[in-house]
Image (cartoon, helix red, strand yellow):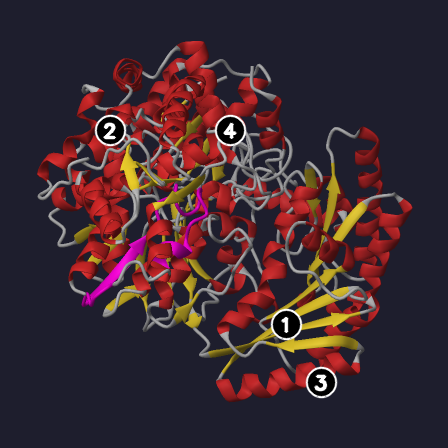
Amino acid sequence: MIPKSIAEEFDQCIKCGLCQATCPVCKELLLEKFTPRGKIQLARYYSQGDLNLSDHYRDIFAKCLLCGACVATCPSGLDPKKVFVGMREEIAKEKGLHPKMEEVVRSLVVHHNISNEDNAERGGWRDFLKELPDHMYQKDKAEVAYFVGCVASFFPMAQQIPQNLVRILESADVDFTILGGEEWCCGFPLIGAGVPEMVREMAEHNLEKLRKLGAKTVVFSCPSCYRTWQEHYETDVELLHSTQLIERLIEDGALRLGEVKATVTYHDPCDLGRNGGVYDAPRKLLKSIPGLTLVELENNRAQSVCCGGGGNLEMVDSGLTGSIAQKKIEEIKRTGAETVVTSCQQCIRTIKGWARRQKADLTVCEITELVLRAISND
Amino acid sequence: MISTSVRDEFRSIVGNEWFLDTPEDLATYSYDGFLPEFRPDAVIVPGNTDEISKVMGVANRERVNIIPRGAGTNITGNSVARKGGIILAFHRMNKILEIDPENMCAVVQPGVVNADLQKEVARYGLMYPPDPASMFVSTIGGNVALNAGGPRGVKYGATKDYLLGLEVVLPSGEVIRTGGKTFKNVSGYDLTRLLCGSEGTLGIFTEIIVRLVPLAPAKVTLQAIFSDLDDAAKTVPAIIGSGIVPTTLELIDRVVLDVIRDYGGAAFSKEAEALLLIEVDGEEVSVEAQGERIEKFCREKGAIEVQRATSPEEADKLWQARRGAFGAIARVRPNCVVDDATVPVKRLPDIIRKILELADKYRLKIGVLAHAGDGNLHPCIMTDLRDKDEMARIDKAMLEMYEATLAMGGTLSGEHGIGIAKDRFMPMQFTEAALELMRGIKRVFDPNNILNPGSFL
């Protein structure tokens, strides 16, 4: 049964259809069932007993980035994303997991990470760093805990992010630690897979480890981990995205930035910007780098268009992710900037991966890479 | 019911992928922006004129109803299968075929989104003036079918004023062309204009030639606040009558201003009973002078506060209240009935007074938004469909409002169309002879009554 709070959302839908204006998925797939309005109505028909959950239903609701563009567009102020997540949950309950998500869920249950590897390997990204301190960034106690996240821990294309961030934190003399093999997935992919009840176990484990560290702040380089903690973890500890912490360090004078001559544009990751409310920190940070020029994308801040990598979509339909990524790349190119900067490993993977496949001449750069370059230039 | 062999015939025309009849597809083409829902028998998503012609040939032979649909944003129930049949959806025919700056026109397929066309032609320093509130999603095909207007209508008119020609598939499957790229064109009956606003009942547009105008180099935006709604309403004909033609002249009443404030929008002065948002466009020198004159008018007519934007950012700020108005209204109650009764602009104060009186008499929450400059009202009735008693009161109030509108020389609909929202009121505006003439036209185009049947006729 669909919970009442979700039913309230679709009862308020006036079927105006304005959500079609910003949904990246329905712009590609065209048909009404793929629009946010269509999905909301399908949720309503199901809840009224008009239609049964089918494999077709599952396919429709899987084709969503959970990017929240519809939330920002809806004139009635609905939260369609809540309906879509609720429907994924309902479908998983009634019909089992989406076949394409079975593997990742199994990996999370067995290994507590998304990549089906031994969780002890979480700190593998450190192997490439020169001059590692003895504690290898894993201490018993620290002021700040850095929650690295699965993608940046295991995927070679994203491992540069923790490598950069630890260098930045070091140079600002921040007392920080990672959780290493004790870090479990935050649970975010489980929400997209429709099994949010499993998040609790992840949260309890991670919070317990955090208590032992005595950290007052947790910093995340992954916007989705950041938001999952904010929404699903019960804790009074301060939660910061890396851009927020770095911006604070710059303001406090703990970090000094040298010149980086470049014209860049900034892509707001959905989970950091629209869904997490962090727009200013990355911009302030970029503007504090001498010599750097920031040109905004046509659609920025709350209007930012998803890169195509959200909502577990790539697992289900990588071709669809590709066509959405292509539009993102075109929008980036229209700015005339040679580099796109963003602050999410998933956006980096998607944009960089598809730019490469399309042989697009574009530099994709995670924000920490730029900060590190500025620090070295000081 | 459509037989299996006929379904197969449709499939062979458009391909399996674009003939849809799963329960999920039928359900999601059972609604538009209006209230009642009707589940169609199938959905066809054609790729070109030839396919549509063939589809119509089969449909006409088999007497299968065909209902054209753009983005499904109309609020008069014009893109639903009221008598069963097949929804013809134009998602794939969404190309801008040509932008022709020398001839100041563009040729588009029906599924092109209005705002996408606006954006493209702006690169040539041109503008497509019709700007319905749904412009970011609604299609040019749908705009033509409903003769859509918008806030810029005061100065620029509606879709019919920018429609030069059409390629049309008739219910028989024959393809005809009307009009062309010339502005002047008086050969024969004006079929282009007849088809514009025909609400999908006469033919299917497959190519549309629209007229473009130069994008104005400058604009001035003003906001005037009045402590008396009547003063605001009287200011409107005063401005229009003075020889200034604003691009936009919008009115928002107290009920709506309060709703905007309650839902996180701007808060206005306590005495504010009405707000006018006025915009003029043109050459910089002339819009500056017009802006000054309008400001003076507003003050003379009793405005307690007038703001003139001096930058695009400030103008944007002034627009925020109007832009957010409908959304705020939509949040108040589960449903919202938006009407578009329209009167000659001089009667604006009278009709607004009448609406307030009706809100009081029938205990309804009605907010008044209006494209005031052309007498086009958008009273928004905030309601709950499940409340039968209130719905009955709304019906009575609407009837009285239309009586008043028509008595003032107005019309049932300024820009939304009739559809199934107002079909029952048509005899109030037209004599039987006029209605029979319309039915006759329908019979000539569509003798088997297969195109969007169950409409206003």
Tell me which residue sits at (50%, 41%) in the image: A71
Q: Nearer the viewer, mark 4 or mark 1?
A: 4
Q: CA distance from mark 4 to mark 2?
A: 35 Å
Q: Looking at numbered disc 3 in the image, what kind of residue is underneath it?
A: Lys
Which residue corresponds to mark 2? A180
Check if mark 1 and mark 3 are on a common chain. Answer: yes
Q: Nearer the viewer, mark 1 or mark 2?
A: 2
User: What secondary structure characterizes most of the magenta part?
Assistant: loop
Task: Give the side of residue A373 with respect to residue A146, left or right.
Answer: left
A20, B393: nearer the viewer? A20
Q: Secondary structure at mark 1?
A: strand
Q: Looking at numbered disc 4 in the image, what kind of residue is underneath it?
A: Val
Q: CA distance from mark 3 to mark 4?
A: 51 Å
The residue carrying pointer 1 sits among few (fewer than 14), some (14 to 19) or many (20 or more) residues within 10 Å by Cα, namely many
Q: Secondary structure at mark 3?
A: helix
Q: Secondary structure at mark 4?
A: helix
Q: Position of residue B125 (x, y in %)?
A: 37, 73
Q: Which mark is residue B278?
A: 1
